[in-house]
Image (cartoon, rainbow, N blue to C red):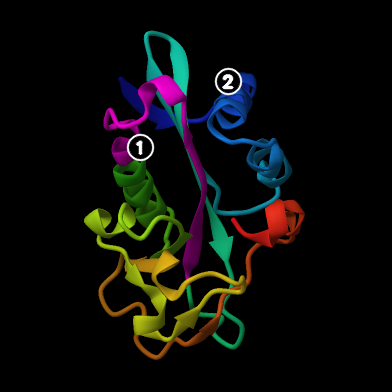
């Protein structure tokens, strides 16, 4: 399996992965809306035997009142059902966090499974004074610092790109 940046030729395969992994097309449509509308934009695919089997996306999130904050949000991530629980998702998260760091992100937030993301260093964002804009359990909205000291003095509620407003109750 190979993890690499998404190319324009990958768009149909990325869409197919999201459609297969989720019960509704919202995540696939979200990726389409975000593509080309944010910077930095970190989009990676997992490829096995020439087939896209996973995808992960990181886009900027804002922290009002803190223009120096360089935060990105991990959303969405999808793996084909036949490849789930085989390490594809973990490889995508690890490669994605490295790519986000290289793109200048000081930290990454995720609204996700509290039993999954801590293995990558994510902790509840509330520990750092960072809040989720959606109605979600505290333990499900997490953050991982990518640069030492980046979270010092930051606090507030993050704002996702407007494209997130169209997804299942506005939660990434």
The correct choice, above or below, for 74 with respect to 14 in the image is below
SS at mark 1 in the image? helix
Residue 43 is at least partly visible in this image: no
Check disc 2: other Cα within 10 Å, few if <14, some if 14-19, many if 20+.
some
The residue sitting at 43% across, 54% down in the picture is 103
In the rendered image, which quarter is residue 125 located in?
bottom left
The correct choice, above or below, for 172 with respect to 144 in the image is above
| Residues rendered magenta in the picture | 70-91
Q: Position of residue 147 (x, y in %)?
A: 30, 69
Q: Which residue is mark 1?
A: 89
Disc nearest the viewer among 1 and 2: 1
The residue sitting at 70% across, 35% down in the picture is 25
**Residue 138 or residue 91, whichever sits in front:** 138
Q: Is residue 82 magenta?
A: yes
Quadrant of the image containing the C terminus? bottom right
The correct choice, above or below, for 40 with respect to 18 in the image is below
Q: Is residue 129 magenta?
A: no
Q: Position of residue 171 (x, y in %)?
A: 62, 60
The label number, if any, that marks residue 13 in the structure image = 2
Task: Please identify the residue farthest to the top as the structure is shown.
Answer: 49
The correct choice, above or below, for 149 with respect to 14 in the image is below
The residue sitting at 70% across, 52% down in the picture is 168
The label number, if any, that marks residue 134 in the structure image = none
Q: Is residue 90 left or right of residue 24?
A: left
Q: Is residue 167 left or right of residue 151?
A: right
In the rendered image, which quarter is residue 26 located in?
top right
Q: Is residue 136 left or right of residue 97?
A: right
């Amino acid at each position: 399996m190979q993890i690499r940046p998404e190319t324009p030729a990958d768009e149909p395969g990325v869409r197919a992965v999201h459609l297969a992994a989720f019960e509704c097309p919202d995540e696939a449509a979200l990726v389409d809306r975000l593509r080309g509308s944010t910077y930095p934009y970190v989009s990676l695919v997992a490829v096995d035997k020439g087939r896209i089997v996973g995808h992960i996306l990181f886009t900027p999130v804002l922290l009002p009142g803190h223009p120096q904050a360089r935060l990105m949000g991990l959303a969405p991530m999808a793996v084909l059902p036949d490849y789930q629980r085989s390490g594809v998702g973990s490889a995508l998260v690890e490669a994605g966090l490295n790519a986000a760091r290289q793109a200048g992100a000081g930290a990454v937030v995720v609204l996700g499974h509290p039993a999954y993301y801590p293995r990558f260093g994510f902790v509840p964002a509330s520990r750092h004074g960072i809040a989720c804009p959606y109605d979600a359990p505290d333990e499900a909205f997490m953050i991982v610092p990518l640069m030492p000291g980046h979270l010092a003095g930051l606090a507030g509620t993050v704002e996702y790109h407007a494209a997130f407003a169209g997804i299942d109750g506005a939660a990434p």
